[in-house]
Amino acid sequence: MSSAALDLHAPHPATDLKEEVGWWGMVIFLLNEGALFASLITSYFYLGLENRSWPPAGTPKPELALPLVMTVALLSSSGTCLFAERSHQRGRRARYRAATLVTMLLGLVFLSIQAWEYHDALRYGGPTTHAYQSIFFTITGLHGAHVAFGVLFLGWALLREWRGTAISSHSLAIKNASTYWHFVDGVWLAILTSLYLSPRWY
Amino acid sequence: MTSIVDDIAQGELALKRRLTAHWETPHNWLGWLSTVDHKALGRRYIYTAFVFFLLGGVEAAIMRVQLARPDNHLLTPETYNQLMTMHGVTMMFLFVQPVLSGFSFYLTPLMIGARELAFPRLNAFSYYVFLLAGVFMYASFFVGQAPDAGWFNYTPLASVKYDAGFNIDFYCLGLIYLGIATTVGAANSIVTILKLRAPGMSIDRMPLFMWSSLTISAAVIFSMPPLTAALGFLELERRWHFVFFDPTRGGNPMLWQHLFWVFGHPWVYIVFLPATGMLSMIIPTFCRRPMVGHAFMALATVATGLIGFGVWVHHMFATGLPQLSLSFFGAASMTVSIPSAVTIFGWVATMWYGRVVFATPMLFALAFIVQFVIGGISGVMTAAVPFDWQVTDTYFIVAHIHYVLAGGTLFGVMAGIYYWAPKMFGFLLDERLGKASFWLMFIGFNVAFFPMHITGLMGMPRRVYTYSQASGFASMNMLSTIGVYILAVGLLLTLVNLVRSRAAGVAAGDNPWGAGTLEWLTTSPPEHFNFAHIPIVKSREPLWDGGFTPGPAFDDARLTPRTSALDAMLERPVEMPIDSVWSVAMPVTLLLAFGALLVHSYAWSAIGIAASLFCMARWMWPSSATVLETEV
């Protein structure tokens, strides 16, 4: 435990990011967010079990075509996001910026298709029709808001990288933004499984 | 020879001047408003929580006057419902949790040998969100529409069909807003406790108050979301006619109860365990020996926190759930008594093997133990399903919750005040007034709440605004009312004690109780930087067995050491942020977002959200100082 060996200004390697308090804070925030979506999805199944038919009579099971396109958009955006982070770590700044912009664009594509999908779903009743529609629009809407926030988060980290000069001052911001993005992507897979796929299994 | 001593003293003075320059908050109104000093904010948390405690106490006192005599019409049923609900909401959400958080934010860095919490600006942010959320909910009284469906706010009573005013909207929006403060405060505590402990303070050397803070913070992270979901559902149903609880369109009122109690039962431990942690700091000090079974005490705390997530249905035994589910949750609820018993026996054994000094903090701690055991026994009784059916929604439950949360937590907080006030303020409290205050509170509390067991068993339902002469509840209720006023006088004496002792100004010194943990190593009150030299820790009670050495000063900037989570090996000193206007502006923009929702002004709400995002982006933007540090 010698303090003399400390070099305050030594550059910190990427592995050190996992010990930053900001990273720990991010992980805890995501656990909290995960618990929120878990509460919502549990409520979806609870209401489903308490109803005789779920979705209710007159409402078809949700279409799969658009959600699968949305899934492809979001999964590939996780890929480009990962590529951006790697490029940043290797000092390839132009690549990082391009890949981040593509990630954000794919997020916006996801949101646009979601708006289109809502337009379709609304034909069978809006969120005030039945508990099924209420919980469906609440969960997907909240997730959409998370995607929108994720786009802003990535953009904010990109702006920091653009304006800053030192790698270390923004690499945590980039790591946190991409982690958030992967999280939002993972939540979508949970939503796809429970809201879109599971009605086809019972 | 003396010149060397002088040189060392000069060096120390110069070091303290450098550290003060790095850590001091600017002496102007903006500095005061936006300070990130955990000590200033911790004190503010405690003061603000006590203001809410006063309001909640006044509500209780008015209700007790109403209930003192049968067929009394001092209050209308509507007013009574509002007072009863706001009493519960205030005590649960605006007093016990925030006051314990205040102690935690004040004490955590001092106990672990750090100079700040992990996220100082987040701490300022969460304080102001707490303050404004409380003000927001209390604003409901000014429009005469305070929440009025009880603190657990069951649907359909809380649905728009039966409660069409703003009452429940204040409750839903206020609690979602307050939940932000609670959640980020918990995240702050977890990261601080895991990453900023002084070098050498491995997890097994950590004080027990830190174990309870860590446990309840983790519980907050996982238990707030179900509440947020439930509140969001209810507000969506009330305002935008979504369906979650209305059974005519596929909803289910039981969804509220499940979500609320999945949050609510962990919450009961969240507002209780920190008080047990305080006791585990106080009892060893006044028994002049280390805690017996330190590791078991820590494990019992964690176990209670975990079990807290598996017992929520015991609040719903009378709702017609399947028998099997009731048996399971009844058994699970009884297992809580195992870690609780470990805790109690740990304290008793410490006293048994020690030499007890009956100072005021110790008296409050002893009363805590007695009252908590009574509350625990009535808890085990209600874990038995048939007994619960008999007493559910009666005053027996009121007695139980008050024995645990007032007899437990409140007495723990009082013990904490008498124990740590000398550290916080630098002066000693008067022991005679302290003991008088204790005895009045102890007698008043038991006179007020013990008879409620009996009125409950006699069949008096809770939450009724009056009762008839024929019911036979009158004498016991009069007794309860008298008790509450004795309790209030006892509390007032502590306030008098604080004012008079401050005027008397008897200096406390660094360690007036001869305690063993690191917070007593600092001056009273602690300096801006807490520790001039970061202690390097080698034992659990470093001040008792000399288990520490003064370590590095880290005086190049505003630095505190970051260590590994389990064994506390030094990683590197990290620079802590200075105060920022953005972290105190954001609570206001968030209030705009929530307040505008209340009055259906959606454009303003959108502006509030956009402004909050902007504040967040600016707040997290690196200051020039940080960029310089990392660019070198």
Image (spheres, rainbow, N blue to C red):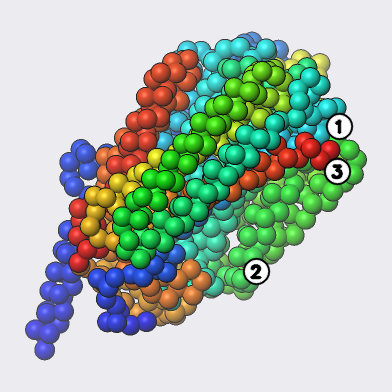
In the image, residue B538 sits, relative to residue A45, either above or below, namely below
* Residue B73 vs residue B627, the one in the foreground: B627
Rounded to the nearest angstrom, the CA distance separating label 1 from label 2 is 38 Å
Q: Are marks 3 and 1 on the same chain?
A: yes
In the image, residue B606 sits, relative to residue B492, either above or below, namely above
Q: Are marks 3 and 1 in contact (CB under 8 Å)?
A: no
Determine the chain carrying the residue at label 3.
B
| In this picture, residue B155 sits left or right of residue B36 | right
Q: Amino acid at mark 2?
A: Phe
Rounded to the nearest angstrom, the CA distance separating label 3 from label 1 is 10 Å
Q: SS of the residue at dot 1?
A: loop
Residue A107: x and y in percent read 48, 40
Residue B441: x and y in percent read 55, 42
Q: Residue at x 60, y 25 (%)?
A: A118
* Quadrant (top left, top right, bottom left, bottom right) of the N terminus of chain A: bottom left
Q: Amino acid at mark 1?
A: Gly
Q: Earlier in the sequence, mark 3 or mark 2?
A: 2
Residue under numbered circle 3: B325
* Residue B310 vs residue B441, the one in the foreground: B310
| In this picture, residue B308 sits left or right of residue B104 | right
Residue B110: x and y in percent read 38, 61
Q: SS of the residue at dot 2?
A: helix
| In this picture, residue B380 sits left or right of residue B185 | right
Tell us which disc is closer to us: 1 or 2.
1
Residue under numbered circle 2: B296
> Residue B320: which numbered mark, if any?
1
Q: Earlier in the sequence, mark 3 or mark 1?
A: 1
* Quadrant (top left, top right, bottom left, bottom right) of the C terminus of chain A: top right
Q: SS of the residue at dot 3?
A: helix
Q: Residue at x 32, y 63 (%)?
A: A91
